[in-house]
Image: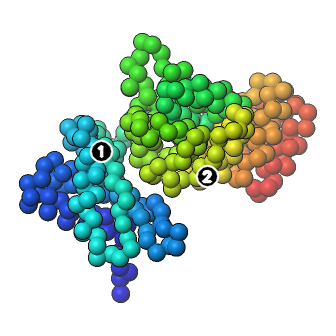
Amino acid sequence: MPTPPTFEEKATDIVAVAAQIARAQNAEPVATVLEKSAASMIQNGSDPYGEAIYYTLTLEIPIYTYANIEEQREGLEQSIRERIRPIVRRYPDTHISEVIITPELSITSRPAALQTEEVPKIEDAPSFWQTGFFRLFISHTHPNKTSAHNLKTALGKYPIAAFVAHDDIEPIKEWQLEIERALRTADALAAIITPDFIESRWCDQEVGFAFGRGKLVVPLCKETVPHGFLGKYQAFQAKGLQVPDVADQLFEMLLEHPLASERMADALVENLATSRSFQASRDAMPLLERVPKLTKAQVARLVQSITENDQVGNAMRIPERIRLLVSRFG
């Protein structure tokens, strides 16, 4: 006997029913948004007794459709939430508390010519990413640009290359295109959460872009708590902490989270293997020793660096520490 679908798995059916009702009532543009959307649902909370469960419904719509309704987006989200409420009455103590309309981020949103390519072109890394470093996009509102800049500076020792728009976009570049390039090529995104973050359409779109590409998003709670999808992800309270402490905690998250750990380990391995001085090797080794897991390729790269790079092989005790480290992983 097949397992009945979960409430989350009913998202498409619920939206399809709402679309038919809206179309029958000639309710535009609600009907079009519902008809063209790809629906997904995640749990975002429950009451203190666990009796009522709350969900966020996300509607991904084609970019052209989104462009036509963007100014009405908040009103449409509220209207759709109200329309869906009677449809889900059949599920006791289950509520859709939030509806999010977002532009489609999948390959189907690309021009037709790109969809037919058998091998998509891999985008070259923009020049603002430091070679070999982990790539972190820092999303922030304009009043918090100094905080973002200070965090970027503190992360350089790990090694993490952080993108901060006002630091990294050249004046002659089309700024929106450069931000999109940074988002497409980033390994993860950190969001500095302040009260004005919720009101920023740009920040919401940056976070949505990262979610859509399956990247890790880390909320850094400076003055408020995460909202929407951000509320489901691991966060830490940055308020009151010194910037180096925030950087170190963020580094630890990147080391441990399955969406980022391998890329972070890659960066640490490469940082040591390409070291240009004995001191750089000694600085890189303690960070590498915090890695919880290494792949076979990473182990091989470290072992080779002992003989291929004099600044590693001849650095005091570094070869021994490398051999001890790789022995932990067989």
Confirm whether residue 36 shows in the render.
no
Q: Identify the residue under disc 1.
A: 74
Q: Which mark, by number, is residue 257? A: 2
Mark 2 residue element: loop
Mark 2 or mark 1, whichever is nearer to me: 1
Residue ranking furthest to the top: 172
Residue 173, located in which quarter of the rendered image?
top left
In this rendering, position of residue 145 left or right of residue 229: right
Residue 1, located in which quarter of the rendered image?
bottom left
Between 223 and 64, the one lying in front of the other is 223
Between 325 and 149, the one lying in front of the other is 149
Q: Earlier in the sequence, mark 2 or mark 1?
A: 1
Question: On screen, 104 above or below 232?
Answer: above
Q: Residues within 10 Å of mark 2 (few under 14, many from 20)?
A: few
- How far separated are the C-alphas under marks 2 and 1? 33 Å
x and y percentages locating residue 154 in the rendered image: 69, 30
Residue in the picture at 66% in, 52% down: 256
Q: Which mark, by number, is residue 279? A: none
Between 294 and 103, the one lying in front of the other is 103
Question: On screen, 296 above or below 282?
Answer: below
Mark 1 residue element: helix
Residue 110, located in which quarter of the rendered image?
top left
Q: Quadrant of the C terminus?
A: bottom right
Residue in the picture at 38% in, 19% down: 174
Residue in the picture at 31% in, 48% down: 101
Q: Residues within 10 Å of mark 1 (few under 14, many from 20)?
A: few
For badge 2, the amino acid type reads His
For badge 1, the amino acid type reads Glu
